[in-house]
Image (cartoon, grey):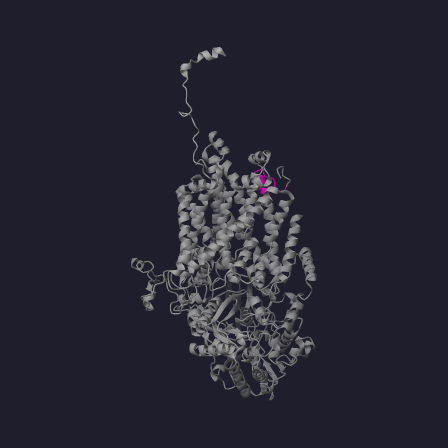
Amino acid sequence: MKKIAALVLMLVMASSIFAGCSQKKPTGKFLRVAKDVELASMDQHVATDGLSFDTIAGTTEGLYSMDKDGNLIEAIAKSYSVSDDNLVYTFTLREDAKWSNGDAVTAKDFVYSWRRLVNPDTASEYNFIADVAGIKNAAKIVTGEIAKEELGVKAEGDNTLVVELERPTPYFLSLTAFPTFFPLNEAFVEEQGDQYALEPNNLLANGPYIMTEWKKGYGFKLEKNPDYYDKDAVNIQGLEFRVIKDHQTAVLKYENNELDVVQLTAELVERYKSDSGYTQIPAGYLWYLSPNFDVELFSNANARKALSHAVNKEHIATKILNDGSRVADFIVPIELATGPDGKDFRQSTGTYCEYDKDKALDYWNKAKAELGEETYEVELLFDDFEAVKKIAEFVQAELENNLPGLTVNLKAQPKKNRIDLMRDGDYDLGITRWGPDYADPLTYLELFVTGGINNYPNYSSSVFDQLVNDSSRGSLSSDPNGRWAAMIEAERVMLEEDAACVPLYQRGFAFLINEKVSGIETHTVGVPFIYKNVKISD
Amino acid sequence: MDNLAKKYSSKAFERIFQDEKLQRDVVYEGLSFWKDVRLRLYQNKGAVIGLVLILVIVGLAYIGPVMNKHTYKSIETEHINLPPRVPGLEKLGVFDGELDGVNVYEQQGLDTVYYWFGTDNLGRDIWTRVWVGTQVSLYIALLAVVIDMLIGMSYGLISGYIGGKVDIFMQRFIEILSGIPNLVVVTLFVMVLNPGIISISLALVITGWIGMSRVVRSQVLKLKELDFILASKTLGSSKSQIIFRDLLPNIFGQVVIMSMFSIPNAIFYESFLAFIGLGLQPPMASLGVLINDGYKSILVYPYMIIAPVIVLAVLMLSFNLLADGLRDALDPKMKQN
Amino acid sequence: MISLATLFVILTLLFILLELMPGSPFNDEKLSEEQKELLYKKYDLDKPLQVRYVTYLKNVIIEGDFGQSYTIQKNVDVSKLLKDRLPISVRLGIQSLIVGSIIGILLGVIAAVYKNSKWDTFTTIFAVIGVSVPSYVFALGLSYFLGYKLKLFPFTYDIYSPVQSSILPTFALSMFVIATVARFMRTELVEVLSSDYILLAEAKGLNTKKVIFKHSIRNALIPVITVLGPLTVGLMTGSLVIERIFGIPGIGDLLVTAISVNDFNIIIGIAFFYSLFYILMALIIDTLYGVIDPRIRVAKEGRNG
């Protein structure tokens, strides 16, 4: 018995020593990034999450791309012109862009890709974005009413792409930087069939990097693309992504200099906030409290207003999260959209529901007088995602302290169920979030239109609806200034007059990024991370 | 006959009168079974220590939360992430409010503030939360043992002793139960039931007893072929008599150990349930939940996890010492020692 | 035959249960009803339950096709995902089983032989700590001290040196095995050592070593094997926390993630293998009972029954 045991132990030890010697780490300048999620898909019409979009944008380029400040820069497109009624865009494409199989990137690749996007057979989760972009016939093709060939996009020769819109869409150009609108090489994609994008060799690249390795669940590797038209701008040999779901392990690996980029949880920030690699990255996600209008208490406007002033958001942002999250006294996030005046939306508006205990109490007393009861009990619904439990606990304490007579019970649910409950209106008060789909205030404002599927509060205001409709499809869509003003007013009506929801914070992310690394570009909307210009100094 | 009588002279005999030195059986004071067990338990040093520790922890679980002005859910926004500090002990260099060499209390100007186990990142008193959590975990420990004993043990006894088709059927049932991922069943639970103690109990009932039933079954399989069972049967014992009077005392050792494993399993399972929303609803805490939450900041604020882990470990150790003693006291074979 | 039926029942039940899960496998936060309809159509999820069930069974039995992942690794075949990940989990499980039982048995034997000595106390305390300190705390501790501070071992899994980088996770996983095996071994061995036939063996003049290794351990193994069975299945199908902490692409984490995002085909696929392992293990254990102790008869109409 003992002998066998010893033998086995020795074998294990011996083999481990040999295994240790046999492998060497690849050398060269690779950016090593830890991620806590797996790469879900490399197919731009299947992908829905940030990491997938990052990686697709790392290997493929569309008409335009974004620079580090979120401004559009030319990529495959050299230039564009637009008709006077803002309905026809004509893009001229560069001639030297190539796919990694040697084919040139042509206007046909865009036509194929965009048709594939709206094709009901593709069933892309992002197919709605074609209609958001205003591309002619997109909505009807998605529902199967007309054929995909009717889509308002055509190639005139290899290097001219003409796009017809249904209505003027101010943010159309910025959407062309979104991976969903990137080109696809028809011959290659069709040849691969249902295997397309499942493995590195089922993929083509036309961008700065090319995928060379993809170990599902473990990580993947991008290497510099030798066929990229702008390859001289790419400074590093590639990127190595590693899936590590435990942030504390990732951080230890970072300290050991085995990783260059790791994300920090709120708990870890405290330890690293004076570290030289500590970096805060703003994100577009906005978290808010959603009161259910169909609950008697929250059908009262004063009760909702009391709610909207009762939570110390500063404490949430700086003490509980402490990762660059910002107080949100608004529903349209900072740095989401730039108006016709060149200023950020937030710079042209007020803030609406700032923390003010006394105000909250005033409204609360009014509400109590109107409703005629002294004590109320509500349930606060949440799911434990991104440390929301702590926020729920804090909100509970704040509401109970600042609004006397209110009892808040917490109800945690799995996320899928939480969303079901909120959609069905089967809750009192819920914590939820929204991430922007495109760089326009509408991506948030449209949530709260009467009957909207994500209108969790079941808010309904004809004034608000009118303002939002006018600025999306209605009379104001070709009047940029009037439209901007209407959206500013819509947000005010919704938050100041009706207190339709209680914004809490705009998410930020804390990272540790190796000091030697520079040039990682981050965006709150569109592609979260662009790695093209990464530099690693010696 | 006469010859034989002659051999012994009458002098060899002494007459005894009834009230004189009549040789009587020494009749010890009648000990009931349980009194006997108790006496033997008290002789076992480990068991006594275990018992005392359990009493202390149970006492603290109920007295601890009222020993300061904080409640398990009161939030002091100015007092977040404070390390442990105890008056008196701080002079000895432990519990002095220092973290990484910095006295956090002095740094924040909280000279007169003391949190014995520190505070968490919402500014709640960990001392209070640990003891409130201990109450919950004690309940869960008790529940786990009861489920083990009631369901697991009977299931194993019946399956093992009756054998044959019944055994096959009962074992396949266990396989089906184990084959379906717990989390699926529990997620469905969350939708139907309101979270709370009842749902925790139900979730534990579904699968908590399987390990116990398997151990009991294996023991019964081993014992039922032995001679003393045959003897008992020959003497006309009924099935239930054999199961409960003959088999049960003999498998008690394994049962006790298995319970020891089910207690922490149940406590951690509860914190897992809390994580997906079926357990206790926050801000209520249990030891498992506190350990889970503390883990998230273990590299930054290790003290947050140390207190609940130590309480749990001590609780477990004392349960074990007591259980070991109890087993020895109950086991008829150990009587001579 | 019976086992096949059990497997079938498990799959059927699981199919029905998953049907009741809240939400869809897709991004419920953003999707409209129309989009969901399209997606359901694409993946044939719009068909009635019984039709999908029959198709699924047919695919599994005839082609070994477990369908595709809907969310985690979109459109990748589940059988391919499992082919990559299952061996990693199984290997790690077997490694920790071997390490754990060897150390556990040794500790248990020492504790039983030197009953009530300080060795015994040590084993008890070790076992108690082994079960009451959660495995993730222990795993991170190993990572931190042996991996990060002392740099003895790599503290995350590395596909290119699977053996060396699996040392820490193996030990972290085997902690619970050690505790379990040691405790059961000790209790049972104490009982065996005080029984008459051991007295006889000693009286015959056999030396202690021989008594323990030839006559006692074998008889004390039954409860150990009983608890090891399900434990092995648990080990081989991966541990959520160990996989997360060491960055191991196994199936433990995959299953939990799949359940939280309703990636049905992955859930069923993993549950299938889990059940298969469990049933095999139960069979093996019942057979082993008879090997270890020929008096034990399982699932036969016992004389005494």
Residue A137: x %, y % from top left:
66, 80
A508 left or right of B242? Answer: left
Which contiguous range is marked in magenta? C286-299
Say above or below: B325 vs A112.
Answer: above
Q: Is C154 inside the magenta-drawn segment?
A: no
Left or right position of A79 against B315: right
Compared across the picture, whether A415 is left or right of B123 comes to right
Of B180 and C90, the residue lying toward us: B180
Q: Which image quarter: residue C30?
A: bottom right
Which residue is farthest top? B3
Q: Is residue C241 visible?
A: yes
- Observer able to see residue A67: no
Q: Nearer the viewer, residue A320 or B153?
A: B153
The percent coordinates of residue B10 (x first, y second) are 42, 14
Is C294 part of what is drawn in magenta? yes
Q: Would residue C117 appear left or right of A411 to someone viewing this image?
A: left
Q: Give x and y (percent) for residue B321.
A: 43, 46
User: Where does residue A332 sit, x and y in percent of width and height?
Assistant: 51, 79
> As displayed, is residue C226 above or below residue A253?
above
**Residue extending farthest left:** B91
Q: Quadrant of the C terminus of chain B?
A: top left
> Does residue B328 sit above or below C168 in this rendering?
above
